[in-house]
Image (cartoon, rainbow, N blue to C red):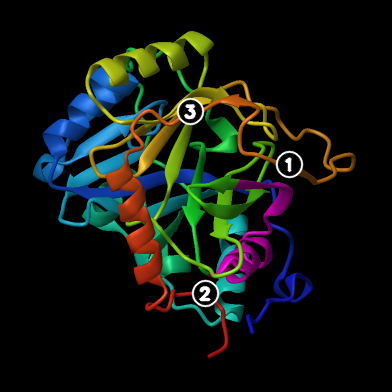
Amino acid sequence: MHARIAPAAVGPSLFGRINLGYLVVESRRLQDWKRFAVEGLGLHADTVEDGALALRIDDHQRRIIVREGAAEDVVAIGWQLQDSTALHDLLRKLRAAKLAVREVAGAQAAGRGVERYWEFEGPKRLRFELFVAPLTSSAPLQMRASGFVTGEMGLGHFAMTTREPAAALAFFQDVFDARLSDTIEDRLNGVTLELSFLRLNERHHSVAIAATRGRRMNPLRTAIHHLNLQARSLEDVTQAYRRTRAMGYGIASAVGQHPNDRELSFYVATPSGFEIEIGWNPILVTDEQAWQPAHYQGISLWGHFPENLTLASRLGQMGRGIASLARREHTVGARP
């Protein structure tokens, strides 16, 4: 049984006061990552300490940090709080959940592009890092893309697959005060997937949680399924699709449109295996009183056809899914 935290007992809501700030990736393929990000997606890249890559899309010095390491995966997710009051409200909630939090400053924080941060172990043992003050830069962006939509809505969104969807949903709703935007079910590769979309602000969702129906399995090697970046123009989406495809990167889903947030997008595999979705023009939830969560059949209205789905990749996912049944997934705030 998952132990829910009573929101009323731990202070004011964090809704509208938190957004997705940055991702940290560990990889042995830094040169490939630079080519992928700069020439393919059209992002700005700086080479920083120890040869790490700092990818920029706005005035934040670092939005995606790719550093040397064996994980080939996302190892940490940064969350930006609106101000110190919001940070203290969240830290109070974490203490109520009996989660250990450590403050980090100095060179390690600068490596994240922030003045300081507070870290704890989140769902699936992903390290969650909380910060208020990002380090910014006025240096012009050198990007092929015309720009990305960030601001108070944050970096974008990410999706994760879990064997413990109830625990993951409870964490984000009780601790981060996330609100359910809608749900989708779809049948992919022989299994039924149930997806929940959670918003933290006007962005339709900052977090998506996917789980297999019935016997819960996790077919993914990586901690997240994808990171979404919202492009400023449709041309940015189509040109990034054409570039990454021509460069030989695996197109997981060709250009298509989702039924719930109406975003037009495509998905491409990163050098580390998880995917990046480049999208355009999703709807915003601007009227909290009027919004009612809906349920949709099918992840796409049209398009999003897989271009690199092979028998070997399907068998690999099936094997990982079966293997995941033997492992207990880490949850946050759950009673033993």
Amino acid type for the residue under numbered disc 1:
Tyr
Number of on-image labels: 3
Is residue 53 positioned above or below 59 on the image? below
| For marks 3 and 1 on the same chain, the one whose residue lies earlier in the sequence | 1
* Residue matched to label 3: 305
Left or right: residue 332 compared with residue 225: right
Mark 1 residue crowding within 10 angstroms, few (<14) / some (14–19) / many (20+): some
Q: Which residue is mark 2?
A: 332
Residue for badge 1? 296
Label 2 Cα crowd, 10 Å radius (few <14 / some 14-19 / many 20+): many
Q: Nearer the viewer, residue 169 or 107?
A: 169
What is the number of the mark on residue 227? none
Can residue 146 be seen in the rendering of this structure?
no
Residue name at image x 11 percent, y 40 percent: 51
Query: Farthest right residue?
Result: 290
Q: Which span is picked out in magenta?
A: 164-186
Residue 94: name its quadrant: bottom right
Residue lying farthest to the bottom in this orientation: 336
Secondary structure at badge 3 equals loop
- The amino acid on which the numbered mark 2 sits, given as a three-letter code, is Val
Classify residue 87 as left or right of residue 101: right
Within the image, what quadrant is residue 48 found in? Answer: top left
Residue 173 percent location from the top left of the image: 67, 62
Q: Nearer the viewer, mark 3 or mark 1?
A: 3
At which x and y percent is residue 131? 45, 53
Magenta stretch contains residue 185:
yes
